[in-house]
Image (cartoon, grey):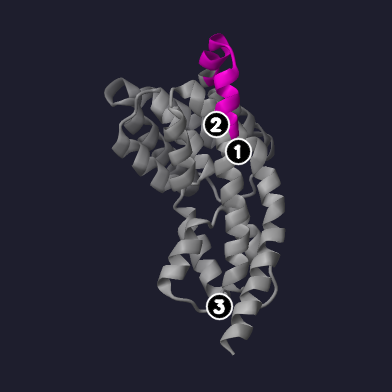
């Protein structure tokens, strides 16, 4: 009986690896870009790799680079990362309802790899999701992100110093590029981005840059969510 269960889990793990290969390919340019920007921000190779290994959260890592570039303290970065990644509480609860029962330690292990993309692949599976499948998807995504971070850093090290210094500016350009599609589709996003920018400018006069960003984000989000009329976004 035990051997049958183990064989089934191996099969599900292999299926998860296959399903996660598309995520691995998708992570390649994003992870390489992160490695490039980490080099331009001034992180060492070990620091950049450690961030991808222990944080493993693309949006939060890009945001952390931005905060590090302006000299934000550790507590502000950790707190902002918590706010950005709080959605993972809901994703984990959703997956927990569909995945087979397992020891809490096992659940803690695969929950670390529950990124947006891993959640999307896992949540679209029919029936009860097997533990082996989640591990397969998460491992493919994890190693792609970590290894390609190193590739990006090495490529960044080979660039001329003038280009390396310009990578910090590229970080802001990337954030703008990520924001533009949403700005075109939703009026609420335009108001959110604009109000957060204005509030950050005001708060930065009185507060450290890290806290001004945190408070501007929180106040702008609350204002957009609870003050604006709850109508269509267009």
Residue at image mark 1 = 148
Quarter occupied by residue 155 = top right
Q: Mark 2 and mark 1 in contact (Cβ < 8 Å)? A: yes
Which range is magenta? 151-167
- Secondary structure at badge 1 equals helix
Residue 103 seen: yes
Disc on res. 43? none
Q: Say what secondary structure mark 2 lies in.
A: helix
Q: Nearer the viewer, mark 1 or mark 3?
A: 1
Disc 1 or 3, which lies upstream in sequence? 3
Q: Which residue is mark 3?
A: 100
Q: Position of residue 120 (x, y in %)?
A: 64, 58
**Main SS category, magenta section:** helix
Instruction: Point out the tag, 1 or 2, that comes first from the N-terminus.
Output: 2
The dot on residue 35 is 2
Q: CA distance from mark 1 to mark 3?
A: 32 Å
């Amino acid at each position: 009986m035990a051997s049958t269960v183990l064989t089934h889990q191996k099969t599900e793990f292999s299926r998860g690896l296959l399903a996660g290969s598309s995520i691995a390919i998708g992570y390649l340019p994003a992870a390489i870009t992160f490695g490039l920007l980490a080099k331009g921000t001034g992180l060492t190779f070990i620091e950049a790799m450690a961030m991808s290994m222990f944080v493993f959260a693309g949006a939060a890592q890009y945001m952390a680079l931005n905060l590090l570039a302006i000299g934000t303290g550790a507590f502000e970065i950790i707190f902002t990362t918590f706010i950005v990644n709080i959605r993972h509480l809901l994703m984990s609860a959703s997956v927990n309802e569909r995945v087979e029962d397992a020891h809490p330690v096992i659940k803690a292990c695969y929950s670390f790899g529950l990124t947006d993309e891993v959640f999307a692949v896992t949540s679209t599976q029919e029936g009860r999701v097997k533990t082996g499948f989640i591990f397969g998807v998460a491992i493919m995504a994890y190693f792609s992100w970590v290894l390609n971070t190193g590739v990006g850093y090495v490529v960044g090290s080979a660039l001329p110093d003038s280009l390396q210094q310009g990578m910090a500016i590229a970080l802001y350009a990337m954030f703008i590029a990520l924001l533009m599609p949403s700005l075109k589709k939703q009026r609420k996003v335009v108001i959110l981005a604009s109000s957060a920018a204005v509030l950050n400018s005001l708060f930065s006069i009185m507060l450290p840059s890290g806290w001004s960003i945190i408070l501007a984000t929180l106040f702008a989000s609350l204002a957009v969510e609870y003050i604006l009329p709850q109508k269509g976004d267009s």
